[in-house]
Image (cartoon, grey):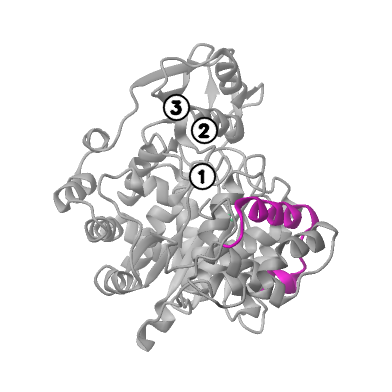
Amino acid sequence: MDAPDAPGDRSGGGSRAPPPERTQLPELIRRKRDGGRLSEGHIRAFVRAVVDGSAQGAQIGAMLMAVRLRGMDLEETAALTRALAASGQQLEWPEAWRPQLVDKHSTGGVGDKVSLVLAPALAACGCKVPMISGRGLGHTGGTLDKLESIPGFTVIQSPEQMRGLLEHVGCCIVGQSQRLVPADGVLYAARDVTATVDSLPLITASILSKKAVEGLSALVVDVKFGEAAIFPSRAQARELAEALVGVGAGLGLRVAAALTAMDKPLGRSVGHSLEVEEALLCLDGAGPPDLRDLVTRLGGALLWLSGMAEAQADGAARVAAALDDGSARSRFQRMLAAQGVDPELARALCAGTPAQRGELLPRAREREELRAPADGTVEQVRALPLARVLHELGAGRSRAGEPLRPGVGAELLVDVGQRLRRGTPWLRVHRDAPTLSDPQRRALQGALVLSDRAPFAAPSPFAELVLPPPARAPPDTRQ
Ligand code: URA
């Protein structure tokens, strides 16, 4: 957490009287703790204290927990979103770019490498994608952490550098910084280590504040539901989707929210460098069908929402074509080189075979295959126990700012719906630890759910799209 542990004015105010809000922080926390509402002024005061360092870490944690337990209504959530967005700079782009400015964000999943593929694919379709993304949160993986497993990749880019990236590449994937939504940076890191991730208003404000500064014409948020999602129940995820769409509309943002299942990992790889490799496969026009399905659907929805495609299906076909003809991969290569990766490494990664790519990215020290304990059809591969064990092995953080082990991860060697024989390898674990503990091995074996059913085709993770108000986006009847 960036906030100091002791109070103190670091803003250099000299003889100025302390701002009245600062002395009120305990009162604001008490008010929320007791179930009261916070006014826009209260919320701005809290966010200001977070950014100027006058809020103690304990106070930030207490307020986050109070909000997690007591919630916020939509007005408070919108006020928090505005205050977080206003904590940094608003990005400004040439007027001619307006219709092309789009972005996608996810509430967080396991194996979710969609952003790595979709940003360059959209750029190849003529969009400008100024993606401000996040790090791992709880057991879910973070886009920035995945990209940082590529040697040299730099997620901190100034607004001026972002403009250059959009001009020359069409997309960038960056982190919040001192200039971009700094308050979200502090709260995001604090939530990750204070069990306050699963809060509807905190998620809504965190996501939309980053997007509000991007000056977008359209945003799609992938709201996960299922065992490994931040909100497991579809009803709760729908509530979050509606909050994102509604609060977004209030901020002048055209937001659609896709509800997608997160029971099994997306694709076949989990872990930072392994997911980069799988994203590259998708950018080759290949890779796991569930990943490609989600990339093309979300991209199709965005192209339609921004008016760049007549229907979602047309947009999806354009995204698929950009994957198949190599233009999306070429944008990815250019983005890597423009964001600090040695151009020769970027070229080798994008042009290489899967085996060659594996040699260019960080690798864990050991690999170990787990075997099916019985005959059966793969009913499910549960993402949650898998993610928790990988987290323990170093793929996630327990303290803010902790370094990650980029090569740690797992490859699924089987698909949902597939028939398996006892003893068949089903999971390859990549670990730096000398061995898996017995509880870890048991938890991983518990992730494989077998049944007596006949083999079946794995379902698409996509469930539904929650659209902005009809007056602003007529329902698409062509898909
Ligand atoms: N992504 C974010 O940016 N914030 C959240 O709270 C969850 C996912």
Spot the residue most to the front. Answer: 15
Residue 40, by quadrant, is bottom right
Element under disc 1:
loop
> Which mark sits nearer the N-terminus, 3 or 1?
1
Q: In the image, which is nearer the foreground, mark 1 or mark 2? A: 1
Look at the magenta stretch and give its main secondary structure.
helix
Instruction: Estimate the x, y position of residue 162 in percent, counting from the top left.
Output: 33, 70
Residue 391 numbered tag: 2
Q: Residue at x 50, y 74 (%)?
A: 14
Task: Kindly report the distance in space between the C-alpha atoms of the residues bearing marks 1 and 2.
Answer: 14 Å
Left/right placement of residue 468 relative to residue 421 reads right
> Which mark sits nearer the N-terminus, 3 or 2?
2
Residue 60, by quadrant, is bottom right
Quick check: 123 above or below 425?
A: below
Residue 413 numbered tag: 3
> Which mark sits nearer the N-terminus, 1 or 2?
2
Give the residue number, with chain letter if any, for mark 1: 400
- Are discs 3 and 2 less than 8 Å apart at CB? no
